[in-house]
Image (cartoon, helix red, strand yellow):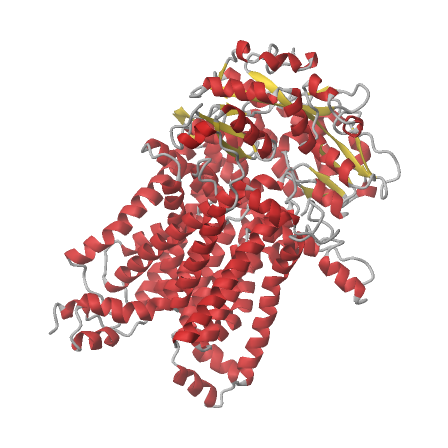
Amino acid sequence: MRQGATSFTAAAGTQRAPGRAGTLLLLPLVAWATLFVVAPAAIMLVYSFLERGTLGGVEWSTATLENYAGVGNPVYLRIVLRSILYAGITTLLCLAAGYPVAYLIGRANLRYRNLLLMAVMIPFWTSFLIRTYAWVTILKSQGFLNSSLLAFGFIQQPLEMLYTPGAVIVGLVYTFLPFMILPIFTSVEKLDGALIEAALDLGAGPVRAFSRVIVPLTSPGISAGVLLVFVPALGIYAVNDILGGGRVDMIGNIIENQIKGNARNWPFGAALGTALLFSFAVVYYFVNRRQRVAEGRA
Amino acid sequence: MSWITRLFAGWTGLVLLFFYLPIAILVLFSFNESRLNIQWTGFTFDWYVKLWRDHVLMRAVKNSLIVAAFSTAISVLLGTAGAWLLHRYRYRAAGLLETLVFLPMIVPEVILGVSLLILFVSINLQLGYSTIVISHVTFCFPFVMAAVQARLAGLDPSLEEAALDLGATPLQAFFKVLVPYLMPAIVSGALMAFTLSLDDLIVTYFTASARTATLPLVIFGRVKKGLDPSLNAISTVLIGVTVLALFVTEALRKRNA
Amino acid sequence: MRSFEWTRFLAAAAFAALVSCGGEERPATPAEEAKPESLAGGELNLFAWSEYLPQAVIDEFTAETGIQVNYEQYGSNEEMLAKLTSGAVAYDLVQPSEYTVEAMVKEGMLLPLDKAQLPNLKNIGQEYYGRVHDPELTYSVPYMQGTVGIVANTEKIEEPVTSYAQVFTDAHKGRIVVLDDSREVVGWALASVGVDPNDITPENLEKAKPVLAKWLPLVKVYDSDSPKTALLNGDVDLGVVWSGEGAILINEGGGKFTYTLPSDGAHMFIDSLAIPKGAQNLPAAHKFIDYLLRPEVSVKISADFPYTNPNVEARKLLSEAERANAASYPPGDPKLTTFKDIGAAAADVDKLFTDMKAQSGS
């Protein structure tokens, strides 16, 4: 008995138009997005056109464009570029370091897989602040790493590792690696074992098997991982503040400063945020469109 | 085990070492005599005792777990449903909706927090568990949705057709065929959501009340004084309980198998 | 895969159970136990600096008065203002710094105190009256006072460092920690060239620019939250930090740290308690302020947070060591300035600082 079975026949490359059920089921999502994404974003947008209030907040009197003029200031543009650079490096490192791990977990049998996944996640259920300060303890001049290296005679003088851009990258990779591993794992797990064996058997060598067959098959997972690392990494403020000694300001710190710091310039913070948001939205919308076309969803 | 697997296993070992080095340090220092978390001065259980009596910290842990559990549950529902519906049906505004959903990931936390606070005030919603959970879900469920979407890409529809052919209702097909297929992604997404919620600081600052203060808020408050080892202790306990629960579950499963 | 859900929820459940059992140290008065929700004595919504008020003091207040204290924390005056002005919570008590008190008074955001309910106010030293932000202590009661001064690790730094110029020399490159606070750092730069740190004009900011250009590349760490960490770790040897941090360094650093106020002039900050407009429980707020003004309570605060205690009666109860701490109670007659509210100019100060920080090549 195929009750309404046709509603589930969607061959790859085609989708059904949503019936009443389809639209209704989507309603919670739409409602959530409208209320808790659009509304706050609208508030931010409106604020970006106002003038700052005396005690922070905004003046509801005049509208102005000067906040956006401020956004174009070379000082801030330089910081935006720096944020993009660090986020990009972090994403690449996470991809390189995380892919093998995700692959291993995805191909492991069920019991090991569970254990490995938990092993990956458990460190991240400790407080982020405490973990990051633990890195301070490790990287400082009298810290664990330096002491070990000195003890083994690898170095004569303590290395200056803490409060450097390198320390920030270490901290960022540490923070975001699980968010690359998990999505890729879901793609790997789906791979047909026979396919992989075939690829490896056909004498092309593992490098080509991976690059031509396996990695492309896991590209949805990779894309998801890149999204889930790069985007949040753009907005970080705490890891670089602690591990970079406050010297590696990113866009997140600047915006934070406008609202939580001395500047008390909410409209400017809102303008920066809106600019960031808008850039992301535009890029994401078009990349997403291409992806949906490729997947047959548009 | 092929040599590739061995290579990857070795690499994974290194990565896990990387993951656990700070954890080892923080567990070690939870037994440190010195308050200042800087140098090892001696072994003591004092901080664990102090932790037990620290009602503010304990309440914060409870709040964090409650909030994380609810946020994860709702995120999983919204994220999975969203991913599935967007995959199954061709909505006109699909691109717009997806962009909107992922927006909270890019919005700097400060701005998200302030905007949500203003929103809650304007709709007269009192700050508390509900406001925190709403805020957390807003930036957590995109992660679930991304994970499930990745899994859905290239889904073979004959899977479901087979189920329907064999007499299942669409609902049965969904729960008995699709959901198990999506499980790894749902679980991945849930793990990410749980982690994000447990650790969120800034957005929670703006949307929490005194009584619903979460662990990160309390910990951040104590940074000024110097992170005293009772904070290390709570992290150690949290890890310990999880590992214990894991072993118990595994043991139970093996017995039932 | 199911084992995850189980593991997670098991862990959460186990933990929640554990947590609910332990931790009930807060003594409950019989009245409180009888009425768990409608609290006898009411509630006090306290919004204060994080880690500036010992929990024990709050618990003892609740035990004595039956007033439940809802303690929310913030890390900066601006954070406090952000949440206060949103109107989300009706706070009964806030803890602004002096320039924020000034700004809030100007905006009519604070309620005048009912001194009849504050008999212990007499314990506050006379030197706290006549200040620009609140000359008669109409709106605010000093909680803790402090300064921002120079900390030196005498094991590494042999010569005395007594002025900003002596801190920021090439010899100290990469060995300095300063506060991550635009107003502070720019203020020091202005003081070092003889300009009043409160006189923020575009011309004066231009004067500060070359000073910052020289100073900032020498800085290793910017940290307003816990600058003592870098000093204790030995990653830096010099710092310009809060006096409370300095006092802790003197106490816990094994005697190698010194705290000196810069001769060019130092910032003196006064953190005060004040009642915001919209407060619901005025009697409780006054009770709490009065409670904190008791000498025996005040010393407990000083023990944990060794800033300068404005309560002269409490000072009498301090130990020798506490009073001798050069950071808590700086000797001599140093040149101190409080911060005035500079309104919109704060954004310009911040921009200058951000700009110079970025240019200092990190």
**What residue is rendered at 47% in x and 45% in y?**
B108
Q: Is residue C297 above or below residue B223?
A: above
Between A93 and C248, which is closer to the camera in this rendering? C248
Q: Which quadrant is home to the N terminus of chain C?
A: bottom left
**What residue is rendered at 63% in x and 56% in y?**
B27
**What residue is rendered at 83% in x and 33% in y?**
C161
**What residue is rendered at 61% in x and 42% in y?**
B223
Estimate the x, y position of residue C321 in percent, counting from the top left: 79, 30
Q: Is residue A163 above or below residue B86?
A: above
**Most extreme residue toward the front, as rendered?**
C30
Q: Is residue C179 above or below residue C314?
A: below
Is residue B150 shown left or right of residue C170? left
**Residue C333 appears in the picture as rendered:** yes
**Most extreme residue toward the right, as rendered?**
C158
Estimate the x, y position of residue B37 in percent, counting from the top left: 68, 48
Is residue A35 shown left or right of residue C232? left
Q: Is residue A126 above or below residue C230?
A: below
Query: Based on the displayed image, in which of its 4 quarters is residue C238 positioned?
Result: top right
Estimate the x, y position of residue C154 in percent, counting from the top left: 85, 39
